[in-house]
């Protein structure tokens, strides 16, 4: 009887040990967790790939900031002035140069309050028949010069087909047409829309990698360096060769040129790099 009691106790303890330590359900559950852990890294790779694709399309982490609110000139002023005069107005959420009443045919360039170094600028523009304007970067207002173009390179805005090319020193060459880095690099193709129609520029100025570029209506048409031997050679073969501060300021303001003709700008936004 004593031995039967000992055997019974041993069987009971063995049963408890099986239930606690070798539970079949617990074993299967552990296996499921192990399989899930094997799949998880693959899911992470897919998410990272999707993230990069969306980032390349500018759909995430864009950090775009509007420089125009469509209602006011907040954030802008006339070159070396404290405010904006009546040469500019706002029509249908666009900045529009309509001409000055002070007798000056030019000299009312619209300048951003903020300075920028490396950035991507997106801007819509519409030129009048025969009109001429431009978009400056690297504008410096601390110099003694009375015009932005003495320090700031310009992306040309112009009515290619109707501008009076005989009226000045600008010849009808690629380096003076729409999309050109004015007098330095001409566009690879002429895809500007007719006067009175909206165009879009994507302008990249990236001193981090010494790269500048212009895309017009979704097509990359101009690429250029921002400094170095190639830049110096370009300057030496241009009208700017004797301009001591031209293109020298990595940090500067954005400018919209008054060239005497009606021009409109809207949807102005920037992404700093």
Image (spheres, rainbow, N blue to C red):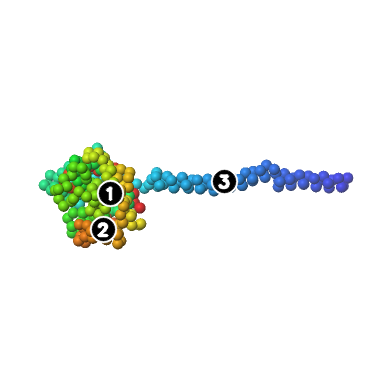
State the mark number for residue 39: 3
Q: Secondary structure at mark 2?
A: helix
Residue 245 lies, with reference to residue 215, above or below; the image says: below
Give whichever of 113, 59 is nearer the camera.
59
Gap in angstroms between the C-alphas marked 3 and 1: 50 Å
Give whichever of 265, 161 is nearer the camera.
161
First-in-chain label (3 vs 1)? 3
Q: Residue at x 26, y 43 (%)?
A: 192
Q: Residue at x 16, y 52 (%)?
A: 169
Q: Residue at x 28, y 49 (%)?
A: 187
State the mark number for residue 187: 1
Foreground: disc 3 or disc 2: 2
Q: Residue at x 14, y 45 (%)?
A: 100
Q: Residues within 10 Å of mark 3 (few under 14, many from 20)?
A: few
CB atoms of marks 3 and 2 within 8 Å: no
First-in-chain label (1 vs 2)? 1
Residue reaching furthest left? Answer: 103
Quadrant in which the N terminus is drawn? top right
Q: Secondary structure at mark 3?
A: helix
State the mark number for residue 234: 2
State the mark number for residue 256: none
């Amino acid at each position: 009887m004593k031995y039967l009691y000992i055997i019974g106790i041993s069987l009971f303890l063995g049963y408890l040990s099986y239930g606690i330590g070798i539970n079949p359900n617990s074993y299967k559950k552990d296996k499921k967790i192990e399989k899930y852990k094997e799949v998880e890294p693959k899911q992470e790779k897919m998410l990272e790939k999707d993230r990069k694709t969306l980032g390349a399309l500018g759909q995430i982490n864009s950090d775009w900031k509007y420089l125009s609110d469509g209602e006011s000139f907040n954030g802008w002023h006339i070159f070396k002035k404290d405010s904006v005069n009546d040469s500019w107005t706002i029509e249908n959420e666009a900045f529009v140069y309509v001409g000055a009443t002070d007798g000056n045919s030019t000299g009312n360039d619209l300048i951003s309050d903020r300075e920028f170094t490396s950035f991507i600028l997106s801007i819509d523009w519409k030129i009048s028949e025969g009109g001429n304007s431009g978009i400056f970067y690297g504008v410096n207002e601390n110099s003694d010069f009375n015009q932005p173009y003495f320090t700031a390179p310009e992306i040309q805005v112009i009515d290619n087909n109707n501008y009076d090319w005989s009226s000045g020193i600008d010849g009808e060459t690629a380096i003076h047409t729409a999309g050109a880095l004015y007098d330095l690099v001409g566009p690879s193709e002429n895809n500007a829309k007719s006067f009175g129609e909206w165009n879009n520029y994507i302008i990249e100025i990236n001193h981090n990698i010494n790269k500048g570029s212009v895309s017009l209506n979704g097509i990359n048409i101009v690429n250029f360096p921002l400094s170095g031997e190639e830049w110096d050679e370009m300057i030496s073969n241009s009208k700017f060769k004797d301009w001591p501060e031209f293109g020298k300021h990595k940090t500067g303001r954005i400018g919209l040129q008054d060239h005497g003709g009606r021009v409109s700008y809207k949807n102005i936004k920037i992404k700093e790099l």
